[in-house]
Image (cartoon, rainbow, N blue to C red):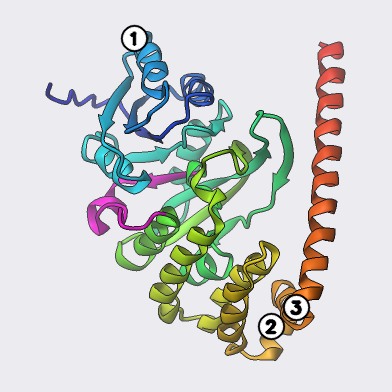
Amino acid sequence: MPIVRNNNVLVTVITPAYNVGPWIAEAIDSVLAQTESRFEYLIVDDGSTDDTADVVRARAALDPRIRLIQVENGGSGAARNRALADSAAPFVAFLDGDDRWHPQFLRHMLETMHTAPPGVGMAYCHSRVMLESGQVVALRWQPAGRIDVDKQLVENNPPHNGSSLMVRRACFDQVGGFDSSLPSAVDFEMWLRIATGSNYPLMWGTRRYLLDMRLMRTGSISSNRQRRFECLDKVISDYAPGMRRMHPGMAYVRPAVFAYRDGLDDFGDRWSLLAREAGTAALARDPWGRSLLAWNGAGRDRRAQLRNLRDGARKSAYRGMSGALRTAGKLSSLRG
């Protein structure tokens, strides 16, 4: 069937979906609830073995803006590329099948793109973190304002999540599609490629919390930390040498800290050596650099103790935030 091009469509929304049956309806409904309605919605079922396609098909029967595309399993990069080939709009936004948007997401991101300085090809919002159940438990800090390639690398992918961005279609026309050979860090590689290979080298961060991202749900790509770090290692080694404002070693600081936190000391030790090439003084001036020096100097046994303490504190914080948000919701409903 030929693709119908609608000149009123401003945004192509793309969801790569693999075995997200329990959550895909919530993601779709968050798109349909957008206050900006000039979008087309392409959902690529990436060879799911659960009821993902059936859930999408039922929603598509109710709204003509939704189109289901079914392909053999090839990963999120290949799924996004399949949808990009069929996209019609000047802007593209991606929503993972287990995340959800605030109703103002598309409207606010379009406004941000139209008012951003020249050279901005991508914009992102802030994110709230939710558990697999959908309960929001935390707000995620992200830098705002102008983000160049150096800051992308030093901040270790400031958007944190591909569901938080809106991208000019022209960026993909200039640099091509996602690298489908990467099993993880696919989005980070793409944002760096746009920053270094297109006419739009800048990213812009907005302070609005318009995305709820599901943290470490069962079967997610990000839950495989070993694979994530292997891909991250390749991406950083490819792009860090091109840094201009800061020493390339600074691109390894945060990844090294994350590796230590996750118990992958081999990555942490190797990345720490590369980070130290920036100089101890530079690391000491940076909060993350100081954290790296502490983790690196602690030794494996002490790091294991620190991880246990940190994980316990993190769980307590999530429980506290979850309870506070539930209480706030009850008070709000009583006032209403």
The image quadrant that residue 296 belongs to is bottom right
Residue visible at 32% across and 32% down in the picture? 44
Crowd rating for badge 1 (residues with CA inside 10 Å; few <14, some 14–19, many 20+): few
Q: Earlier in the sequence, mark 1 or mark 3?
A: 1
Q: Amino acid at mark 2?
A: Leu
Alpha carbon of mark 2 to alpha carbon of mark 1: how far?
Answer: 55 Å
The image quadrant that residue 256 belongs to is bottom right
Q: Secondary structure at mark 3?
A: helix
Question: 163 or 223: which is nearer to us?
Answer: 223
Q: Amino acid at mark 3?
A: Arg
- Write down the residue under mark 3: 290
Question: 191 or 51: which is nearer to us?
Answer: 51
- Write down the residue under mark 1: 61
Q: Is residue 4 left or right of residue 207?
A: left
Percent coordinates x, y for residue 283 in the rendering:
69, 83
Percent coordinates x, y for residue 294 in the rendering:
77, 78
Q: Secondary structure at mark 2?
A: helix
Vertical comparison of 206 with 271: above or below: above
Residue visible at 44% across and 63% down in the picture? 231
Pointers 1 and 3 in contact (C-beta within 8 Å): no
The image quadrant that residue 258 belongs to is bottom right
Crowd rating for badge 2 (residues with CA inside 10 Å; few <14, some 14–19, many 20+): many
Q: Amino acid at mark 1?
A: Ala
Question: 104 or 159: which is nearer to us?
Answer: 159
The magenta span reads 165-183
Alpha carbon of mark 1 to alpha carbon of mark 3: how far?
Answer: 54 Å
Pointers 3 and 2 in contact (C-beta within 8 Å): yes
- Please give the label number shown on residue 283: 2
Percent coordinates x, y for residue 84 in the rendering:
27, 41
Q: Earlier in the sequence, mark 2 or mark 1?
A: 1
